[in-house]
């Protein structure tokens, strides 16, 4: 039986700040999204966002599969299947997907992460049925020709060599995850280990496709200039006969608590030393994620941030300093990435990071830097949804991460609610030395 949810209006109020001072009441911006949601009999969840402001659509399919769903022996298969989805189905043969789409003025791309795999096509509004036809064809009847499996795997291996094996930053990133995680699948790279890429065969691909590319494991989002009733009719016409599959087994492994600092060294040909520092942080269900986003902005968000000012402008010890805190389904990492200047050692960067964290724990943050951080996050949030592609992508990500895209409407308010006390508490809770992993680059001639 079809389950139809009523049209949902999401009203997001956002204080936008373009200078480093608190926003005023006149800076309020309102963003409205109206979505119609229906789940087909085969389990495919469809989210339609009709918007006639520009004559384009973004057609996106998100699958609940990423590197965390893999196992030892087939690491990298999620990313590899992303490639294979462009290599031929019953109606549109190898390489025809992009050729047909581009001949009609469209553009496609895809991405794979730890938690999800997503595909999108952007095209003029008269291309809706073409997108429905193209995407349903490859979900229904991907051929997985052994010849193209072999050739595409060579492409993926070369991508791994470029992004990891021959990349200083890529090698450090890979080692950091491998050291920080003992048990959880986040320990292996999304692109996979080379030995697994050598061993993956057609049987692995067929099983993986059947399990994770089923309609009941997918979300279809269409945003832009179309008629909702006509779009839903097309989707039923092309997708209804695709059968559901047995739901994938959940990821059960939980990473044990880290009991002490872990360290690694990468010795690689490079001109300058660098260091990555990471701390285990909570999963998407924790409200601390908003506080940690604010903390990341305070520490490295822009030229006025604490660590940029200290390491790049004042001591001139570093070429660059960045922090990242990607949201994940399971607990992941808050990471600092610092590249040193000639004549400076990575210990200077470590000492600066630890000193700033201790200062925040002991003294909190200034009112103006807290206000600036929150306003930057809120402004970035609004900007990310100004295009139909951005809106559809945001909806897909939130469906995967939170299980409900309507969580979008809570985000700006949660940023605005972050207090100095919460920032101090989060810093004290997560940035302890026993919870830390450090990977240092030692340049070799």
Image (cartoon, rainbow, N blue to C red):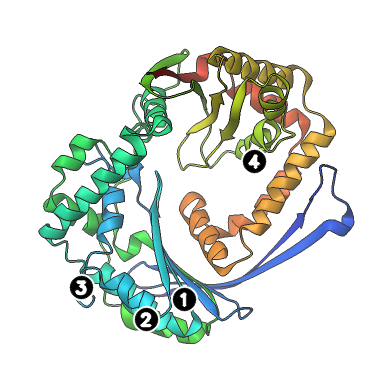
Q: Which residue is mark 2?
A: 130
Label 2, label 1: how many angstroms apart (C-alpha)? 10 Å
Image quarter of residue 394: bottom right
Q: Residues within 10 Å of mark 2 (few under 14, many from 20)?
A: some
Q: Which residue is mark 1?
A: 123
Sequence-wise first label, 1 or 3: 3
* Position of residue 141 measured from the top left corner of the image (x, y, whole percent): 21, 70
Location of residue 412 with respect to 94 vertically, above or below: above
Label 4, label 1: how many angstroms apart (C-alpha)? 34 Å
The reply to whether dot 1 and dot 3 touch (C-beta < 8 Å) is no
305, 424: nearer the viewer = 305
Label 3, label 4: how many angstroms apart (C-alpha)? 45 Å
Mark 4 or 2: the one toward you: 2
Residue under the point 36% across and 79% down:
103
Label 4, label 2: how many angstroms apart (C-alpha)? 39 Å
Residue under the point 38% across and 20% down:
266
Tell me the element at label 3: loop
Mark 3 or 4: the one toward you: 3
Sequence-wise first label, 2 or 1: 1
Q: Which residue is mark 4?
A: 290
Tell me the element at label 2: helix
Residue 219 can be seen in this image: no
Q: How many marks?
A: 4
- Residue 354 as seen in the image, left or right of residue 128: right
Tell me the element at label 1: strand
Which quadrant holds the N terminus? bottom left
Mark 4 or 1: the one toward you: 1
Can you tell which mark lies on residue 93?
Answer: 3
Q: Residues within 10 Å of mark 1 (few under 14, many from 20)?
A: many
- Residue 184 as seen in the image, left or right of residue 144: right
The reply to whether dot 2 and dot 1 touch (C-beta < 8 Å) is yes
- Residue 387 as seen in the image, left or right of residue 306: left
């Amino acid at each position: 039986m079809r389950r139809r949810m009523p049209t949902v209006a999401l009203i997001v109020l956002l204080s936008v700040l373009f200078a480093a001072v608190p926003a005023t009441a006149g800076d309020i911006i309102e963003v409205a999204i109206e979505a119609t949601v229906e789940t087909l009999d085969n389990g495919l969840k469809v989210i339609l966002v009709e918007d006639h402001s520009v004559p384009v659509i973004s057609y996106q399919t998100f699958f609940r599969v990423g590197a965390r769903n893999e196992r030892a022996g087939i690491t990298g298969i999620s990313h590899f299947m992303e490639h294979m989805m462009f290599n031929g189905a019953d109606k549109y043969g190898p390489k025809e997907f992009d050729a047909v789409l581009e001949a009609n003025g469209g553009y496609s791309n895809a991405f794979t992460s730890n938690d999800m795999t997503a595909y999108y096509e952007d095209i003029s509004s008269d291309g809706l049925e073409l997108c429905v036809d193209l995407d349903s064809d490859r979900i229904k009847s991907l051929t997985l020709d052994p010849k193209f499996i072999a050739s595409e795997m060579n492409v993926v291996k070369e991508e791994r060599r470029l992004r990891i094996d021959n990349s200083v930053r890529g090698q450090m990133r890979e080692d950091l995850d491998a050291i920080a995680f003992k048990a959880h699948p986040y320990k292996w790279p999304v692109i996979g280990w080379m030995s697994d890429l050598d061993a993956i065969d057609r049987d692995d691909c067929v099983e993986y496709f059947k399990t994770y590319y089923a309609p009941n494991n997918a979300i279809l989002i269409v945003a832009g200039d179309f008629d909702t009733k006509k779009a839903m009719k097309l989707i039923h016409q092309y997708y209804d006969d695709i059968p559901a599959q047995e739901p994938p087994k959940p990821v059960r492994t939980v990473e044990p608590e880290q009991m002490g600092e872990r360290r690694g060294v990468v010795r690689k040909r490079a001109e300058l030393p660098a260091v990555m520092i990471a701390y285990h942080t909570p999963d998407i269900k924790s409200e601390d994620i908003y506080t940690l986003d604010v903390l990341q902005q305070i520490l490295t968000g822009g030229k006025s941030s604490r660590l940029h000012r200290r390491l790049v402008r004042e001591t001139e010890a570093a070429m660059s300093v960045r922090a990242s805190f990607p949201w994940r389904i399971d607990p992941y990492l808050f990471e600092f990435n610092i590249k040193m200047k000639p004549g400076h050692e990575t210990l200077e960067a470590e000492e600066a990071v630890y000193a700033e964290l201790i200062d925040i724990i002991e003294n909190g943050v200034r009112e103006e830097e807290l206000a600036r951080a929150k306003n930057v996050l809120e402004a970035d949030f609004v900007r990310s949804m100004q295009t139909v592609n951005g809106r559809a992508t945001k909806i897909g990500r939130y469906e995967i991460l939170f299980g409900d895209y309507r969580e979008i409407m809570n985000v700006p308010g949660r940023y605005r609610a972050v207090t100095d006390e919460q920032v101090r508490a989060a810093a004290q809770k997560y940035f302890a030395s026993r919870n830390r992993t450090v990977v240092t680059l030692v340049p070799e001639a």
